[in-house]
Amino acid sequence: MSTPGSGVGQGRANTGGKRFISGVVEGFYGRPWTMEQRTELFKREQKWGLNTYLYAPKDDYKHRMYWRDLYSAEEAEQLIALISAAKQHDVEFIYAISPGLDITFSNPKEAAALMRKLDQVRQFGCRSFSLLFDDIETEMCAADKKAFSSFAYAQVAITNAVYQHLGDPETFLFCPTDYCAAFCTPSVLQSSYLHTVGEKLLPGIDILWTGPKVVSHKISVESIEEVSSVLRRPPVIWDNIHANDYDPQRVFLGPFKDRPTELIAKLRGVLTNPNCEFYPNFVAIHTLATWCKATADGRQRDVEMDDEEQDPCYSPQKALTLALTDWLQEFMSTDQPGGPCRPPARLKKEVSEEEPMQTDMGEGSYIPGPGENPLYTAEPLTLEDLKLLSELFYLPYEHGPTARTMLQELDWLKNHSLAAAAETDKTAEWRSRAQQFDGLCEAVVQMFNRLSNAPNRSILYDLYNYICDIKSGVGLARAYVKTLGGQARPAAQLLNTDPEPWGFRGGLSGEFQRMLPCHGNRDLFRHPLMTSVYSIRMFCPEDKMEVQRIFREMQSAGEGKVPMMMQPPLICDGLSAGEIPPSPQCALVLEDEMGVCGYALALTDAKPAAARIQRAVSDSVFQDFPSLVTIQVLPRVADPSPAKRMIGRLLSSIRSSGSRGVFCEVRHSDRRMLDLYPKLGFFKPITMAGFPQDIIAMGTSL
C-alpha cells in the first residue's frame, strides 16, 4: 500500500522492501479515544503522509483484561466502520491484543481462544495484527514452567503460532516484555530474553521497542544498531516521548525531537504513543510527519534548515512552527460538524466580504449607553500564543525557552531580593528584571484569555485543566515577586498558615512527594535552589559571627527611609548583636545546605536588657510578659514552616523556665518582620506602656 506524500521507506534495504511504518499507536492508559476522533486521526495521517494506526488502548477491556471475550454485534459494527475508515484514508489499521495478564501459554485452549478472537477481527476487514506482552509479570505459572524453558520461549511459541494461523500477514508486530534497554538484564547485548526473541521469532514478525527507557529522552543510531543486532531485525519504535498517562498535570506540546533522521534507514518504522487527550496531539503527530519526510540523501522537503541545526535533515523548531501554524487554523474554526468556520460573535476580526453584516439585533442584543461599561470583546488567538503554550508544556525532559527564562528570572529575583528592599548596586537591575518577569506572566494570562475564547471548544476543553493550572502557578509567582519588590502586601495564598486550597497544589500525591528526600531533585530547571532540607539545632559559640552577620544584613534590609542610627533601639538588638548572651537553652539556629540561614534567641527575664537601653517598661507588663524573643531568617527561606518550628521549640524552652509570657519588638518600617511574626501563629499585637510610638510589641501567653 502506498501513502500519498509520505516519501519514506520505499525500497530500504533494512526493511526488506517493505513500506516504512509511520503513524500513531493508541496505547496509553486512560479513557480511549472515541470512534469519531479516530476517524479524524485517519484524515490527518493521510493529509500529513503517515500510514499506520495501531489500535492498543490499555483500557479497552476486550483488548487487555478480557481479551478472550468476543466483540458484541454493536462493538463489531463500530470496529468494522473504523477499519473501513482507515482504508478509505490509506491508513493501515493494526489490531493489537494484549493477553499477557493471565494467559497460560501451555494450554491449547488459551491459544485457540486467542486465535478465535483474532479471526473475529479479521472478519471485520482487518489484515494487520499485533501481540503485546508489555507491562506484565514475568513469573510463569507452574504449568508453563513445565512446558517452556523460559518466559521468552513461551511468548515466542504462541506468537509464531498465531502469526502462521493468520496466514503470515505482511504486518505483524510483537511487543516484548523487555521493550526498552532499561528492562534488559544485565544489558541489551547480554539479555537472554532478547536473544531468544531474536533467534526464535519468525523473521516476518516485527518487534516494537521504546528505546533506552520507557520514555526515552534521546534515541541514538548506536543504540538502535545494538538492539537490531540482538533482535536480528530493525525494530519499530513505539515512541512515548509525548505520552502523558503517567502524570495528570502534564501535557506535551513540543516537537518530535532528539531522534536523528539517520534512524530512518535503521528502523522498520516509528509510531508515536501521544497524549491521552486527542486534540492536543496535533503537534506531536504533525512534527513526527515532518520528521518522517526527511529523505535518505540528507534533504527534507518543505523545511529549510539553519546552519546551527544539529540534524541537517530536520529542524524541530521549524517543524513546530509549521505545526502550530496549521493548529491555529483549527483553533479558529468552530468544532460543530457542518458549522460555520468563523469566530463567535464579538471576537475581534475584520469583517469579510463573504459575511453579510448582521442587522437583526434581536431582544438579546445590548448596546451600552454613555458612561456605561463597554461590551467585553475577546482578542483573537495568535501564533505567538500557541508558541508560548507549547513552550510552557514542552517535553518530558525539558521546558521550552520561555518557561526556562521564567524559572531563571524567578530564581534570580528570589536570590537577590535584598536588592529590592534596600538600595544596592543591583537594585536597578532587580527592578528591571522584575518588570520583565511580570511581562512574561502577563503574556501567560493573556494567552489563557485568548485560548478560553477560541471558537473550537473541543481543543479548549482538552487543554483547559492544564492552562488553568499554569495560570494559577504563574499567578502565585507573580504575586511573590511583587511582594519582594514592596509593590504589595503578601497575597493571602503566599506564606499563609491558613491558605485557600488553590494555594497548595497536588493533593495527597503531592504531599507524599514533598515528604520524600529526593523531591525536587529531578526538576527540569537544574539551577535554582531545590526543595531545601532544614535543620534546627542549639546555638553554639561558633555561631556568634553568623548570627551577627544575619542581624546586620537584615537590619540593613529593613532600614527603610530613616537611617538605623536615628531610630530608637530595640531591646533585642543587643541579643542579636552578641552584646547580651541568650538565656540557657534559649538559643537556636536554622541551617540549610548553604549554612546558617536563621536564628531564634530569647531572654527569660528581659528586665535587665530593657534597663540597659533605658527603656521604661512598667512592672505589670513584665509580670504578664517577662520574656523576650527575637527571630530572623534570610530571604532565601521562603517557606515559613522552618521558622515556625524553630520558634515553637524556643517557646517550649521558655515555658519550661516558668515564664508566663513572651513579647517581641518590631519597627514600623520593617515590613518583612511585621508580616512574618503573625504568620508564625503565636504572636498578636499587645500594648506596652513606655514603648516608643514607632515600635510595635507583639506577645503571647505561655
Image (spheres, rainbow, N blue to C red):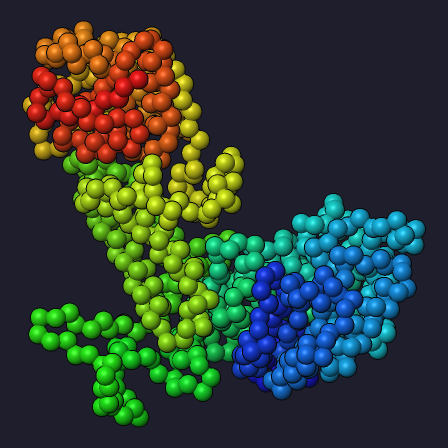
Answer with left or right where residue 552 lies relative to residue 66.
Answer: left
- Looking at the rendered image, the quarter that the N terminus falls into is bottom right
Image coordinates of residue 366 in percent, x first then y, are: 19, 79
Answer with left or right where residue 391 lies relative to residue 123.
Answer: left
Q: In this view of the protein, which residue sits in the foreground, 689 or 191?
A: 689
**Residue that appears at 46% across and 47% down:** 506
Q: Residue furthest right?
A: 146
Image coordinates of residue 20 in percent, x first then y, are: 66, 74
Q: In this view of the protein, which residue sits in the foreground, 628 or 485?
A: 628
Image coordinates of residue 462 in percent, x first then y, are: 46, 66
- How many numbered callouts? 0
* Above-or-below relation of 31 to 83: above
Q: In this view of the protein, which residue sits in the foreground, 90 or 698?
A: 698
Answer with left or right where residue 61 lies relative to residue 145.
Answer: left
* Residue 7, image quadrant: bottom right
Is residue 421 shown to the viewer in this render? yes
**Residue that appears at 27% across and 13% down:** 660
**Residue that appears at 23% across and 71% down:** 376
Image coordinates of residue 197 in percent, x first then y, are: 81, 59
Q: In this view of the protein, which residue sits in the foreground, 543 or 667?
A: 667
Answer with left or right where residue 66 lies relative to residue 619.
Answer: right
**Residue that appears at 56% across and 78% down:** 36
- Looking at the rendered image, the quarter that the C terminus falls into is top left
Q: Residue furthest front?
A: 363
* Above-or-below relation of 127 to 429: below
Is residue 2 shown to the viewer in this render? no
* Residue 678, image quadrant: top left
* Residue 62, image quadrant: bottom right
